[in-house]
Structures are given as structure tokens and as C-alpha cells.
Image (cartoon, rainbow, N blue to C red):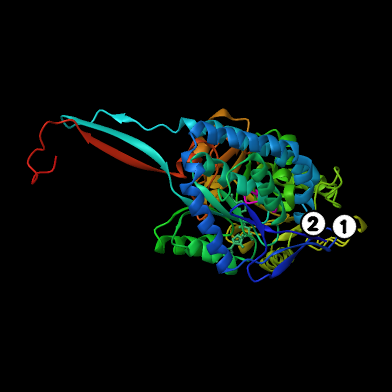
Amino acid sequence: MQKYQMLIGGEWVDAADGSTFETTDPYTGQVWATLPRAKQVDADRAVDAAAKALKGEWSRMTASSRGLLLCRLADLIARDAEQLARIEVRDNGKLIAEMRAQVGYLPQYFRYFGGLADKIEGAVLPIDKPDTFNYTRHEPLGVCVAITAWNSPLLLAVNKLAPGLAAGNTFVVKPSEFTSASTLEFARLAKEAGIPDGVINVVTGFGNEVGAPLVEHPRVAKIGFTGSESGGQRIYETAARGFKHATLELGGKSANIVFADANLDNAVKGAISGIFAATGQTCVAGSRLLVQDSIYDEFVGRLVEFAKKARMGDPKEATTQVGPVTTPPQFKKILEYIDIAKAEGARCLLGGKVATRPECGAGQFVEPTIFSEVRNDMRIAQEEVFGPVLSCIRFKDDDEAISIANDSLYGLAAGLWTRDLRRAIELPKRLDVGIVWVNMYRAVSYMSPFGGYKRSGLGRENGMDAIREYLQTKSVWISTAEEVPDPFVIR
Ligand code: NAD
């Protein structure tokens, strides 16, 4: 059994009261590690350490040196990528094939934002006042808190840390209580890279016990949150009371839209990757498949045949395609939604039950599930399931497809499958979402903004937008006049 400690102010520590909690391998069902169960006092210690680091060596470092440290961290992640990927698989049940790709890609975030660190440039403004020099500075916000969901713990933490550190902030990271191990392993590398003590602190534990005190802490300037819509709402309300900045990456119910003119072989693969990759436990899941009437029966039939062959099993095997559900509450929730869909009158064409194949071991698996004849007003089409459950909906033409796609409280992503150039260019403008993929699905890059419209969130991660989310602008005025003019008149 592995015993983890948290990183606060450069020291590996237990929770102040010594309490711990366990983490489980979703495939074997066995507890494999214990972690400190942090509380308010630990949150306070971590914020103090981050506040102290903000005034120390970190703030005196040139932006170029800061960037170089992030590039060094990138090299260490690349060195240990296989080990980090295996920890994610063990703690999360993610597929090793996907984790090798995802963790192998993380260094690029630190290289990109490390490179940006010394390109945060203010401007000299041609100000409309005589004898006045005015310029802007973009400064860090201060102590930032990163709170992450369980589905891609390292990626979600890196999405916040890379731009936030490049901008000169310090951090307290609180990973999900279900999947904290990889963030602690990552923190070990940050220490090895020479990032000064207290710049990255990691506390582990539960949302109400240590997450809430972090969000409430008066010395915290910003919350970068990835998680559920309800969690985001709670955090945003608390942040508002303290006038804190917040970036919220929340849920989705994304429409993947297939037109009759699409390359259907590719569209089938796109629909599958939209919902069964990562066992559907992804915010951008294309969980509503909108298919044009004239090809609906043929397309859904092909989809069922393809999904039937998906290989379920041990996520450590490179050939596995669908892994276990990560957490027991999520497993229960997925099965409840399957019952809801059946009760609403959706037609279950595939799956719709717990998977009990021998290759599923002791894991909690749900059979890849496809519902047909779903109406967009059904709960299965409106609420996020976060599992391998697809709702297929018919549409007639462009207008109806857009109207169904936009008829959602969420607005994270959408997919379009078409060979028509006009559609490929015009329809993305009409979709109320933050990300549109045309003839592809589920691509992300450190270079391209990621985030949602409507209840899918606020702010953007990745790309130039992300670094701005961790900066505030100061306007500096210098008079070059010999004499101060009339003090009772605004200049
Ligand atoms: P969650 O909201 O239950 O928990 C997220 C994090 O918030 C956890 O670390 C949790 O401990 C913490 N937390 C809970 N209550 C808190 C409180 N009162 N104060 C502070 N912290 C608190 O979400 P989850 O179940 O871990 O994640 C699944 C959700 O995340 C899904 O809705 C999914 O769509 C979303 N998600 C979104 C994105 C995105 O980029 N848009 C990416 C991944 C996941």
C-alpha cells in the first residue's frame, strides 16, 4: 500500500490532524494508496505558503528564468511520462493507450506557456493628454487555487498551472478526492525542476473539507475550477462574495451532427470517439448524436455494429478500448440515467446494462449504450450522464439541426460531419458553443482556446486567452509637465 503526503511550502506533510483517506483502483476494486485528508487548517497553511512564495524568489526572478523553469519541468514530465500514465490508469481506470498520449503531450503545455512568460508585454499608449506618459503592465493576480475533477486529473491541473505560473502567480492545487495521486507525483517533479518552495502546493481531501476553505480564503485571488455545473455554481457564488476571479470549466451535453452528405465511415468513427472514448467520462462527450433523417436508420445501424465490437477490459492493456467507470457514485448515476431513458420511451439498441464480461474483472463497467428515437426534450438529451451512453436524435435540415443543438443549457462543444463547404463554414457561427469540430471530434491543443458557452463555464483555458485569465492590467500615468494644473478639474 502506497502512503502519499501533500506538498506545502516545499515540505512533504501529513494532514495536521493526521487523518487520511483511501484511493481505489477502479479495475481491481482494491484500495492501493492512502492520502492525507486535509481540512481548513491545512488549506490555511497552503495558502500562507503560496502567499509567502509570491513575495520571495519567484517574484524577483526574471520572466525568462521563470519560463526556463517551466521548460525544465516539461523535460521532467517527458522523462517520467510512462510512470505518470500508469498512475493515472491505476487511480482512474483510464486506458493506458490514451494516457500515454495525454501525459506525453503535457510537456508541450509547459513549453508553450514557458515560452510566453517573457512575452507578456504592456503597451505605451499615445495618450490624449499633454505632457503625460501612460503605459500598461500585465501583472499576476496572486495566489490561485486550482480545483480539478476526477476524469483527467493531470491534464486539468496543467491547464491551470502552465498559464498561471507563466504569468507569475503561485498555486494551491486541490485534485479530486477520487484521483489525487498523479497530482502529487507531478508536484514531486516540480520540486525537482527547482520551482521555488511554496509556488506549487498540493492539498488532498474532500471538497467540503478543504476545497471550500480554499475558495473562501481571503488571500486567494483566483479560482481555476474544473468540475460539475453545481460545483461550479457553488464556487462562483463564494468567489463573488470575496471578489475573486474565477475560470469555470463545467459540464456539457454536446451535439455531434451528421449530415447525409458526410463521409459516413469517418462520421461513424467520430460518433464513437465522441461517446465511447474515455468511457464517455469526458466533458466534451458528443452525447447527443443528431443524424439527418434520410440516413438515420443506416447510420445508427452501422454505429451499433461498430460499438458492439468495442473491446472492454483491463485499462492496463494497450488494446482495451472501453474501461471501467471511475467512481462508484458515477457508476450508479449512469445506470440511473439508463433507467430514466427507458422510462421516457427511448429505444435501447445496444447495451443498457452493467457489463459482466469476464474481461471486466472486478471493475464497474457499463456496456456501451445506444438509445434511438430520443427527443431533445427528454432528460437523457438534456442532462449530462458522463458515461458511455449515446442519445440518437433525428433532424430534417440545417435549421432543425442547429435548433436542436442549441436547445441545451450547456454550450461546451459540437461536432459537424459534412462535405459541404458552405455548411462547414456557416454552421459553426450559428452554434452556441465554445468549441466546434468539423469532420473531426475531441481534438485539444495547448494552443487553442478551450471552454464553454452558457452553463458550460466561464473563461478559457489553453492558448493566448488562458494566460490573460491569470493576469490583471495596471495603467501607469507619469506627468512630464512643469506644473500641476488646476487641482479641481479632472485632467
Ligand atoms: P465535482 O464538481 O463533483 O468536483 C470537482 C472538484 O471540486 C473536486 O476536486 C471536488 O473535491 C471539488 N469540490 C466539491 N465541492 C467543493 C466545494 N464546496 N468547494 C470547493 N471544491 C469543491 O465534479 P466531478 O464529479 O469531479 O467532475 C465531473 C464534472 O466535471 C462533469 O460535469 C464534467 O463535465 C466536468 N468536467 C469539465 C471539464 C471542462 O473542461 N469543461 C473537464 C473535465 C470535467
Q: 310 or 446: nearer the eye?
A: 446
Q: State whether label 1 is within 8 Å of ligand 1.
A: no
In this view, 197 is above or below 71: below
In this view, 286 is above or below 351: above
Q: Quadrant of ligand 1?
A: bottom right
Residue 445: in sight, yes or no?
no
The percent coordinates of residue 16 (x first, y second) are 63, 68
The percent coordinates of residue 119 (x first, y second) are 47, 30
Residue, disc 1: 360
Q: State whether label 2 is within 8 Å of ligand 1.
A: no
Residue located at (66% from left, 67% from top): 37
State left or right for residue 185 relative to residue 357.
left
Give SS at disc 1: helix
Q: Which residues are magenta?
A: 281-286
Q: CA distance from mark 2 to mark 1?
A: 8 Å
For the residues labelled 2 and 1, say whether their Cβ atoms are less than 8 Å apart.
yes
The percent coordinates of residue 56 (x first, y second) are 49, 46
Q: 156 or 39: nearer the eye?
A: 39
Residue, disc 2: 324
